Image: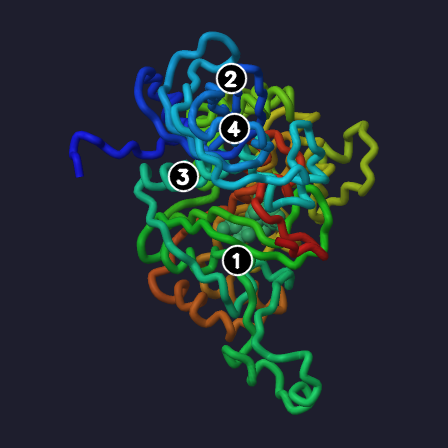
Amino acid sequence: MNTNQKKIQRTKIFSLIKNKQTGIQVLIKGWVRTRRTSKKFSFVEVNDGSCISNMQIIVDNTIKNADSIDSLTTGSAVSVKGELVESKGGRQAMEIIAEEIELISLAPQSYPLQKKRHSDEFLRTIAHLRPRTNKYGAAFRIRSELSFAVHKFFKERGFIYVHTPVLTGSDCEGAGEMFKVTTLDFTNKEFIKNCSGYNDDFFGKQANLTVSGQLSAEMFALALGDVYTFGPTFRAENSNTSRHVAEFWMIEPEMAFCGLHDNMDIAETFIKYLINHIMENCKEDLDLFAKFVNKTLMQTLDNIISQNFLRIPYNDAVNILSKAKKKFEFEVKAGHDLCSEHERYLTEKHFKKPVIIFDYPKEIKPFYMRVNDDNQTVAAMDILVPGIGEIIGGSQREERLDVLEQRFDETGINKDEYWWYLDSRRFGSVEHSGFGLGFERMLMLVTGISNIRDVIPFPRTPKNIEF
Ligand code: 4AD
Ligand code: MG
């Protein structure tokens, strides 16, 4: 082979735009967004998914294969070799003068993503194709960058990343909202008749998809200091809201030798860090959301990163809500959980900034939260943000063995099953805290997308497991 004839490597459009180096030979592959054909030239807009910008390809109608351009439809895949030049006009800074163009595959006219705006509802019915639109391409590039930022934040602070199990025998939140995992064949009537329950099942006891990695993360925090887990979690809540899905990702840091207020500090710093990272690294994609999805997006984000979150005890929050002029659908009752409308009133109308509510009544919170000296409340904290409501739930954990055992009894959970969890309080127990950030809710916050189904590739909700 002639070594002077270097093979051109395929380049991503984002890097061509970033490097701004014209006059070079390039090869790109992607999908056709639009085509215009004139007498001498065809203009083809190609997108390769690497960024929101298309690359305009100028095809002289005399080059080889030029006639195949005439049939190029939206959604077709092409490969283009040519020279990258400064654009003479138009919106883009650069374009490619094609020397070779090859049709990789032709999309028929029935391709559902024609050049018009489609509703989010319609696009959910074609969730397998929606990442090819500008909006969803941008959303999922931001999702990728946000995951990276999560790891970067913890890495910079010396946290250790722990992979907690997805299959579990315990119910961390004690709310019984778990999907059961079984290999038993419930369609086989004969088998069911003779089956003695979970003893016959794969694990010999009930197994579930995890609702939270917290309990496992605690074991590692009590060995490695500061840890975090970041993975999928599952909840069989039958709630069809714009903020709940049955499968979502959660980031759960757990810190040893850390009390409730330090926990809040880390959570607040974390949210601000993630927003800053996306504002700095996803400018072009974020621009789309600020222009077309939520006109007040940048204002909301600036408002969050530029001031301290407000911190108030649960009792004070309830007082504010009971004096509020607004008519709520659900009554505000001391000792009860706050509803989404109450949370949103506090953060959007009353304080107009993120709010951290702490010291909740112990009756409405899980067994693991540390009981306060008043013996009425626990060292819990929820962070509420405008547009969403609860984005983080966390707490200081009960580290006293006797109090924890009592909490198991009070909440009606069989403590024998949690012998290993109790062991961690038996041997070198220390003050520790952590929280869970809903990854999809964080994405809703940074993009302004108002339905959680639109920030996760293939949403799982009641009666919906297509794709
Ligand atoms: O408040 P939650 O239930 O807290 C826990 O699971 C703790 N074990 C976390 C911890 O302390 N390590 O859930 C944490 C967050 C919520 O604030 C919310 O953002 C998100 O997870 N979340 C959901 N997101 C989407 N769909 C659902 N069904 C969600 N349920 C909770
Ligand atoms: Mg919660």
Residue 58 visible here: no
Q: Are there few (<14), some (14-19), or many (20+) residues within 10 Å of tag 3?
A: few
Q: Looking at mark 1, is its residue's CB closer than 8 Å to ligand 1? A: yes
N-term-proximal mark, 2 vs 4: 2
User: Which residue carries the number 4 mark?
Assistant: 67
Q: Residue at x 60, y 36 (%)?
A: 384
Judged by depth in the image, the label closer to the viewer, 2 or 1, is: 2
Give the alpha-carbon distance from disc 1 to disc 3, as whole Å.
Answer: 30 Å
Instruction: Report whether 81 appears left or right of 136.
Output: left
The earlier-in-sequence mark between 1 and 3 is: 3
At horizontal 54% and vertical 21% (from top left) the residue drawn is: 287
Label 2–label 3 contact, CB within 8 A? no
First in sequence: mark 4 vs mark 3: 4
Disc 3: residue Cβ within 8 A of ligand 1's nearest atom = no
x and y, in percent, of residue 47 in the image: 50, 30
Query: How many numbered tags mark residues here?
Result: 4
Q: Nearer the viewer, mark 4 or mark 3?
A: 4
